[in-house]
Image (spheres, rainbow, N blue to C red):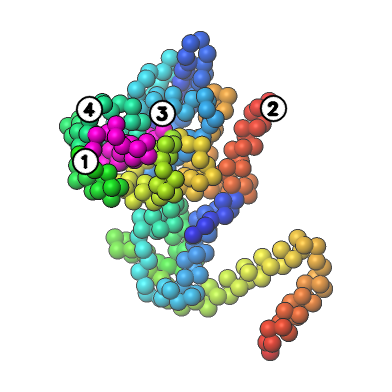
Amino acid sequence: MEFQTDTPIYLQIATDIKQQILKGALCPGDKLFSVREYSILYEVSPLTVQRALQQLELEGVIYARKGVGSFVNHGMQENLRRQMVAVQAAEFVARMRNCGLTKAQIRKLVEQSLNEEGME
Amino acid sequence: MDELLQMRGVRKGYGGAYIFQNLDLTVSKGRIVGLIGDNGTGKTTLLRLMAGLIPPDDGEVIRQESILGKSGISYLADSSWFYGWMKVRDAVSFYSNFYQDFDVNKARLLLQESSIEPGKKIRHLSAGEAQRLCMILAVSRKAGLYLMDEPASGMDPAFKKKLKHFLLSCLPEGAAVIMATHLLKDLETLFDDVILLKGGEALCLRTEEIREKCHKSVEEYYLEVRNNAGNA
Protein backbone atom coordinates (compact mmCIF):
# COMPACT_ATOMS: atom_id res chain seq x y z
CA MET A 1 0.00 0.00 0.00
CA GLU A 2 1.29 3.42 -0.96
CA PHE A 3 1.11 5.95 1.82
CA GLN A 4 0.75 9.69 1.61
CA THR A 5 3.77 10.91 3.52
CA ASP A 6 2.36 14.30 4.48
CA THR A 7 -0.35 12.98 6.77
CA PRO A 8 0.04 10.59 9.71
CA ILE A 9 0.58 7.05 8.56
CA TYR A 10 -1.07 5.41 11.54
CA LEU A 11 -4.36 7.05 10.57
CA GLN A 12 -4.04 5.79 7.01
CA ILE A 13 -3.52 2.26 8.31
CA ALA A 14 -6.52 2.58 10.63
CA THR A 15 -8.63 3.75 7.67
CA ASP A 16 -7.39 0.88 5.53
CA ILE A 17 -8.44 -1.65 8.15
CA LYS A 18 -11.83 0.06 8.50
CA GLN A 19 -12.29 -0.22 4.76
CA GLN A 20 -11.49 -3.92 4.91
CA ILE A 21 -14.25 -4.29 7.48
CA LEU A 22 -16.68 -2.34 5.33
CA LYS A 23 -15.84 -4.43 2.30
CA GLY A 24 -16.35 -7.61 4.26
CA ALA A 25 -12.72 -8.72 3.99
CA LEU A 26 -12.77 -8.61 7.78
CA CYS A 27 -15.91 -9.71 9.61
CA PRO A 28 -17.13 -9.09 13.16
CA GLY A 29 -15.34 -11.45 15.50
CA ASP A 30 -12.44 -11.97 13.10
CA LYS A 31 -8.95 -11.87 14.54
CA LEU A 32 -6.69 -9.21 13.10
CA PHE A 33 -3.10 -9.90 12.13
CA SER A 34 -0.46 -9.35 14.78
CA VAL A 35 1.43 -6.07 15.09
CA ARG A 36 4.50 -7.70 13.56
CA GLU A 37 2.53 -9.12 10.63
CA TYR A 38 0.96 -5.75 9.84
CA SER A 39 4.33 -4.07 10.21
CA ILE A 40 5.79 -6.34 7.51
CA LEU A 41 2.67 -6.09 5.35
CA TYR A 42 2.50 -2.29 5.37
CA GLU A 43 6.31 -1.87 5.59
CA VAL A 44 6.09 0.46 8.58
CA SER A 45 7.54 0.33 12.09
CA PRO A 46 5.73 -1.85 14.65
CA LEU A 47 5.08 1.24 16.78
CA THR A 48 3.15 2.82 13.92
CA VAL A 49 0.98 -0.29 13.66
CA GLN A 50 0.46 -0.28 17.41
CA ARG A 51 -0.75 3.29 17.26
CA ALA A 52 -3.15 2.46 14.44
CA LEU A 53 -4.62 -0.42 16.44
CA GLN A 54 -4.89 1.78 19.52
CA GLN A 55 -6.82 4.29 17.43
CA LEU A 56 -9.18 1.58 16.23
CA GLU A 57 -9.71 0.40 19.78
CA LEU A 58 -10.43 3.95 20.88
CA GLU A 59 -13.07 4.23 18.18
CA GLY A 60 -14.62 0.95 19.24
CA VAL A 61 -13.88 -0.70 15.92
CA ILE A 62 -11.77 -3.44 17.47
CA TYR A 63 -11.15 -4.81 20.93
CA ALA A 64 -8.00 -6.41 22.29
CA ARG A 65 -7.71 -9.58 24.33
CA LYS A 66 -4.40 -9.53 26.14
CA GLY A 67 -2.09 -12.30 25.08
CA VAL A 68 -4.41 -13.36 22.28
CA GLY A 69 -4.76 -10.50 19.84
CA SER A 70 -7.18 -7.93 18.45
CA PHE A 71 -10.63 -8.69 17.12
CA VAL A 72 -13.21 -6.91 15.00
CA ASN A 73 -16.02 -5.59 17.12
CA HIS A 74 -19.63 -6.49 16.46
CA GLY A 75 -22.29 -4.06 15.35
CA MET A 76 -20.21 -1.10 14.27
CA GLN A 77 -20.47 -1.56 10.54
CA GLU A 78 -23.33 0.88 10.16
CA ASN A 79 -21.46 3.48 12.21
CA LEU A 80 -18.34 2.86 10.17
CA ARG A 81 -20.19 3.25 6.93
CA ARG A 82 -21.66 6.55 8.04
CA GLN A 83 -18.29 7.74 9.24
CA MET A 84 -16.47 6.80 6.04
CA VAL A 85 -19.16 8.33 3.85
CA ALA A 86 -19.05 11.57 5.85
CA VAL A 87 -15.28 11.74 5.44
CA GLN A 88 -15.56 11.16 1.69
CA ALA A 89 -18.22 13.86 1.38
CA ALA A 90 -16.16 16.37 3.34
CA GLU A 91 -13.08 15.62 1.24
CA PHE A 92 -15.06 15.98 -1.97
CA VAL A 93 -16.48 19.34 -0.95
CA ALA A 94 -13.03 20.55 0.10
CA ARG A 95 -11.55 19.53 -3.23
CA MET A 96 -14.34 21.25 -5.16
CA ARG A 97 -13.88 24.41 -3.09
CA ASN A 98 -10.17 24.25 -3.94
CA CYS A 99 -11.15 24.26 -7.59
CA GLY A 100 -13.01 27.49 -6.93
CA LEU A 101 -16.57 26.19 -7.03
CA THR A 102 -19.39 27.81 -5.07
CA LYS A 103 -21.95 25.92 -2.99
CA ALA A 104 -24.48 26.24 -5.78
CA GLN A 105 -22.03 24.98 -8.37
CA ILE A 106 -21.12 21.97 -6.27
CA ARG A 107 -24.83 21.09 -5.83
CA LYS A 108 -25.37 21.38 -9.58
CA LEU A 109 -22.35 19.15 -10.20
CA VAL A 110 -23.67 16.47 -7.88
CA GLU A 111 -27.12 16.63 -9.49
CA GLN A 112 -25.59 16.23 -12.93
CA SER A 113 -23.57 13.27 -11.80
CA LEU A 114 -26.58 11.60 -10.18
CA ASN A 115 -28.66 12.07 -13.32
CA GLU A 116 -25.92 10.55 -15.44
CA GLU A 117 -25.78 7.60 -13.06
CA GLY A 118 -29.49 7.16 -13.54
CA MET A 119 -30.04 6.94 -9.80
CA GLU A 120 -33.40 7.57 -8.14
CA MET B 1 13.38 3.34 31.85
CA ASP B 2 13.32 3.18 28.08
CA GLU B 3 16.65 4.77 27.34
CA LEU B 4 19.24 2.55 25.73
CA LEU B 5 21.83 5.19 25.16
CA GLN B 6 22.48 8.80 26.05
CA MET B 7 24.94 11.30 24.69
CA ARG B 8 25.63 14.35 26.83
CA GLY B 9 27.63 17.36 25.77
CA VAL B 10 29.56 15.31 23.25
CA ARG B 11 32.31 17.02 21.35
CA LYS B 12 34.16 15.39 18.48
CA GLY B 13 36.46 16.74 15.88
CA TYR B 14 39.07 15.76 13.36
CA GLY B 15 42.15 17.67 12.38
CA GLY B 16 41.26 20.87 14.20
CA ALA B 17 37.69 21.08 12.94
CA TYR B 18 34.77 20.12 15.15
CA ILE B 19 31.92 18.05 13.78
CA PHE B 20 29.99 18.15 17.02
CA GLN B 21 30.47 20.81 19.68
CA ASN B 22 27.87 20.00 22.30
CA LEU B 23 25.69 17.13 21.27
CA ASP B 24 22.80 15.84 23.37
CA LEU B 25 20.92 12.79 22.24
CA THR B 26 18.77 9.99 23.65
CA VAL B 27 18.09 6.64 22.03
CA SER B 28 14.96 4.88 23.26
CA LYS B 29 14.00 1.22 23.28
CA GLY B 30 12.15 -0.26 20.33
CA ARG B 31 12.19 2.80 18.11
CA ILE B 32 13.36 2.84 14.50
CA VAL B 33 15.30 6.01 13.88
CA GLY B 34 16.57 7.59 10.69
CA LEU B 35 19.82 9.53 10.92
CA ILE B 36 19.70 12.14 8.21
CA GLY B 37 22.31 14.58 7.04
CA ASP B 38 24.38 15.56 4.06
CA ASN B 39 27.73 13.96 3.50
CA GLY B 40 30.26 15.30 5.94
CA THR B 41 27.73 16.26 8.62
CA GLY B 42 28.96 13.48 10.87
CA LYS B 43 26.56 10.55 10.43
CA THR B 44 29.31 7.94 10.42
CA THR B 45 31.11 9.66 13.28
CA LEU B 46 27.92 9.72 15.32
CA LEU B 47 27.28 6.01 14.75
CA ARG B 48 30.85 5.19 15.71
CA LEU B 49 30.51 7.24 18.90
CA MET B 50 27.33 5.36 19.74
CA ALA B 51 28.92 1.99 19.09
CA GLY B 52 31.89 2.93 21.23
CA LEU B 53 34.29 2.47 18.34
CA ILE B 54 35.69 5.94 18.89
CA PRO B 55 35.74 8.05 22.05
CA PRO B 56 34.30 11.56 22.31
CA ASP B 57 36.79 14.41 22.75
CA ASP B 58 34.57 15.68 25.53
CA GLY B 59 31.24 14.82 27.11
CA GLU B 60 29.90 11.32 27.70
CA VAL B 61 28.23 8.45 25.90
CA ILE B 62 26.24 6.39 28.39
CA ARG B 63 25.05 2.92 27.46
CA GLN B 64 22.40 1.26 29.58
CA GLU B 65 23.88 -2.21 29.78
CA SER B 66 20.95 -3.46 31.81
CA ILE B 67 18.54 -2.83 28.95
CA LEU B 68 20.86 -3.37 26.01
CA GLY B 69 21.56 -6.77 27.43
CA LYS B 70 24.64 -8.87 27.12
CA SER B 71 24.61 -8.48 23.38
CA GLY B 72 24.36 -4.75 23.30
CA ILE B 73 24.92 -3.10 19.98
CA SER B 74 25.12 -4.61 16.52
CA TYR B 75 26.97 -2.43 14.06
CA LEU B 76 26.46 -2.95 10.36
CA ALA B 77 29.88 -2.33 8.95
CA ASP B 78 30.68 -2.32 5.29
CA SER B 79 32.44 -5.25 3.76
CA SER B 80 35.93 -3.82 4.00
CA TRP B 81 36.78 -5.80 7.13
CA PHE B 82 36.57 -9.14 5.38
CA TYR B 83 39.90 -10.75 4.64
CA GLY B 84 40.61 -11.58 1.00
CA TRP B 85 40.88 -15.33 1.64
CA MET B 86 37.55 -15.52 3.46
CA LYS B 87 34.65 -17.50 2.16
CA VAL B 88 31.11 -16.61 3.15
CA ARG B 89 31.04 -19.45 5.66
CA ASP B 90 34.26 -18.16 7.25
CA ALA B 91 32.65 -14.81 7.90
CA VAL B 92 29.69 -16.61 9.46
CA SER B 93 32.03 -18.66 11.68
CA PHE B 94 33.91 -15.55 12.66
CA TYR B 95 30.73 -13.86 13.80
CA SER B 96 29.54 -17.01 15.50
CA ASN B 97 32.72 -17.32 17.52
CA PHE B 98 32.98 -13.66 18.32
CA TYR B 99 29.38 -13.00 19.36
CA GLN B 100 27.47 -15.04 21.94
CA ASP B 101 24.17 -13.80 20.61
CA PHE B 102 24.75 -14.87 17.01
CA ASP B 103 22.11 -17.15 15.51
CA VAL B 104 23.94 -19.34 13.01
CA ASN B 105 20.82 -21.04 11.73
CA LYS B 106 19.13 -17.73 11.07
CA ALA B 107 22.17 -16.51 9.17
CA ARG B 108 22.34 -19.67 7.06
CA LEU B 109 18.63 -19.45 6.24
CA LEU B 110 18.90 -15.81 5.23
CA LEU B 111 21.93 -16.56 3.05
CA GLN B 112 20.00 -19.34 1.36
CA GLU B 113 17.04 -17.05 0.71
CA SER B 114 19.43 -14.50 -0.76
CA SER B 115 21.04 -17.16 -2.95
CA ILE B 116 24.48 -16.45 -1.52
CA GLU B 117 26.60 -19.59 -1.55
CA PRO B 118 28.44 -20.35 1.67
CA GLY B 119 31.40 -21.73 -0.22
CA LYS B 120 31.93 -18.67 -2.38
CA LYS B 121 34.93 -16.44 -1.75
CA ILE B 122 33.86 -13.04 -0.48
CA ARG B 123 35.97 -11.20 -3.01
CA HIS B 124 34.05 -12.99 -5.74
CA LEU B 125 30.71 -11.71 -4.50
CA SER B 126 29.12 -8.78 -6.29
CA ALA B 127 29.01 -5.51 -4.40
CA GLY B 128 25.30 -6.03 -3.80
CA GLU B 129 25.83 -9.54 -2.45
CA ALA B 130 28.65 -8.41 -0.17
CA GLN B 131 26.47 -5.68 1.25
CA ARG B 132 23.65 -8.13 1.79
CA LEU B 133 26.05 -10.49 3.55
CA CYS B 134 27.02 -7.73 5.97
CA MET B 135 23.38 -7.04 6.66
CA ILE B 136 22.57 -10.70 7.22
CA LEU B 137 25.46 -10.99 9.68
CA ALA B 138 24.31 -7.88 11.53
CA VAL B 139 20.67 -8.92 11.87
CA SER B 140 21.53 -12.48 12.88
CA ARG B 141 22.84 -11.08 16.12
CA LYS B 142 20.27 -10.62 18.82
CA ALA B 143 21.04 -7.11 20.00
CA GLY B 144 19.08 -4.35 21.69
CA LEU B 145 20.30 -1.71 19.27
CA TYR B 146 21.23 -1.99 15.61
CA LEU B 147 23.36 0.69 14.00
CA MET B 148 23.42 0.87 10.21
CA ASP B 149 25.44 3.19 8.07
CA GLU B 150 23.80 3.66 4.68
CA PRO B 151 22.67 0.03 4.46
CA ALA B 152 21.20 0.49 1.01
CA SER B 153 24.33 1.84 -0.63
CA GLY B 154 25.91 -0.61 -3.00
CA MET B 155 22.81 -2.80 -3.08
CA ASP B 156 21.13 -4.08 -6.21
CA PRO B 157 18.00 -2.06 -7.03
CA ALA B 158 16.00 -5.27 -6.75
CA PHE B 159 17.03 -5.81 -3.15
CA LYS B 160 16.72 -2.12 -2.28
CA LYS B 161 13.01 -2.42 -2.96
CA LYS B 162 12.78 -5.33 -0.53
CA LEU B 163 14.94 -3.65 2.12
CA LYS B 164 12.10 -2.49 4.36
CA HIS B 165 10.44 -5.89 4.19
CA PHE B 166 13.73 -7.62 4.89
CA LEU B 167 14.55 -5.54 7.94
CA LEU B 168 11.09 -5.66 9.44
CA SER B 169 10.92 -9.43 9.12
CA CYS B 170 14.49 -10.15 10.26
CA LEU B 171 14.99 -7.77 13.14
CA PRO B 172 13.99 -9.16 16.53
CA GLU B 173 10.89 -7.80 18.20
CA GLY B 174 11.50 -4.64 20.18
CA ALA B 175 14.80 -3.90 18.51
CA ALA B 176 15.91 -0.29 18.32
CA VAL B 177 17.51 0.77 15.06
CA ILE B 178 19.48 3.81 14.05
CA MET B 179 19.96 3.99 10.33
CA ALA B 180 22.02 6.64 8.60
CA THR B 181 20.58 7.23 5.17
CA HIS B 182 20.02 9.81 2.49
CA LEU B 183 17.10 7.83 1.05
CA LEU B 184 14.42 9.60 3.07
CA LYS B 185 11.98 9.46 0.20
CA ASP B 186 11.91 5.66 0.16
CA LEU B 187 12.54 4.93 3.80
CA GLU B 188 10.69 7.59 5.78
CA THR B 189 7.65 5.38 6.37
CA LEU B 190 9.92 3.01 8.27
CA PHE B 191 11.05 5.54 10.86
CA ASP B 192 9.43 6.40 14.17
CA ASP B 193 11.89 9.22 14.69
CA VAL B 194 14.49 11.11 12.72
CA ILE B 195 17.70 12.75 13.84
CA LEU B 196 18.46 15.64 11.49
CA LEU B 197 22.09 16.71 11.54
CA LYS B 198 22.86 20.30 10.70
CA GLY B 199 25.66 22.60 11.78
CA GLY B 200 27.07 20.15 14.29
CA GLU B 201 23.76 19.78 16.09
CA ALA B 202 21.14 17.09 16.18
CA LEU B 203 17.44 17.85 15.78
CA CYS B 204 15.38 14.89 17.04
CA LEU B 205 11.80 14.67 15.87
CA ARG B 206 8.95 12.18 15.71
CA THR B 207 7.98 11.49 12.11
CA GLU B 208 4.24 11.34 12.73
CA GLU B 209 4.39 14.64 14.60
CA ILE B 210 5.97 16.30 11.56
CA ARG B 211 3.19 14.91 9.40
CA GLU B 212 0.43 15.81 11.85
CA LYS B 213 1.56 19.34 12.72
CA CYS B 214 3.32 20.48 9.56
CA HIS B 215 1.32 18.57 6.94
CA LYS B 216 4.56 17.76 5.23
CA SER B 217 6.49 14.64 4.51
CA VAL B 218 9.63 14.16 6.57
CA GLU B 219 11.61 14.53 3.38
CA GLU B 220 10.07 17.94 2.64
CA TYR B 221 10.61 19.05 6.22
CA TYR B 222 14.24 18.00 6.17
CA LEU B 223 14.92 19.82 2.90
CA GLU B 224 13.51 23.01 4.40
CA VAL B 225 15.62 22.64 7.53
CA ARG B 226 18.69 21.93 5.48
CA ASN B 227 18.21 24.89 3.18
CA ASN B 228 17.49 27.25 6.05
CA ALA B 229 20.68 26.23 7.74
CA GLY B 230 22.51 27.11 4.57
CA ASN B 231 21.04 30.59 4.51
CA ALA B 232 21.54 31.31 8.20
Identify the image quadrant of residue A94.
bottom right
- Tell me if residue B80 can be seen: yes
Cβ–Cβ below 8 Å for labels 3 and 1?
no
Residue type at the position of mark 1: Pro
Residue at image mark 2: B231
Q: Position of residue B81 (x, y in %)?
A: 30, 26
Marks 2, 1: nearer the viewer: 1
Residue at image mark 1: B118
Query: How many neighbours does mark 3 have within 10 angstroms: few (below 14), some (14-19), or many (20 or more)?
Result: many
Residue at image mark 4: B85
Q: Which residues are magenta?
A: B120-149
Cβ–Cβ below 8 Å for labels 4 and 1?
no
- Tell me if residue B135 can be seen: no
Marks 3, 1: nearer the viewer: 1
Give the chain letter at badge 3.
B
SS class, disc 4: loop
Of mark 4 and mark 1, the one earlier in the sequence is 4
Residue type at the position of mark 3: Leu
- Name the disc covering residue B47, or none: 3
Q: CA distance from mark 2 to mark 1?
A: 52 Å
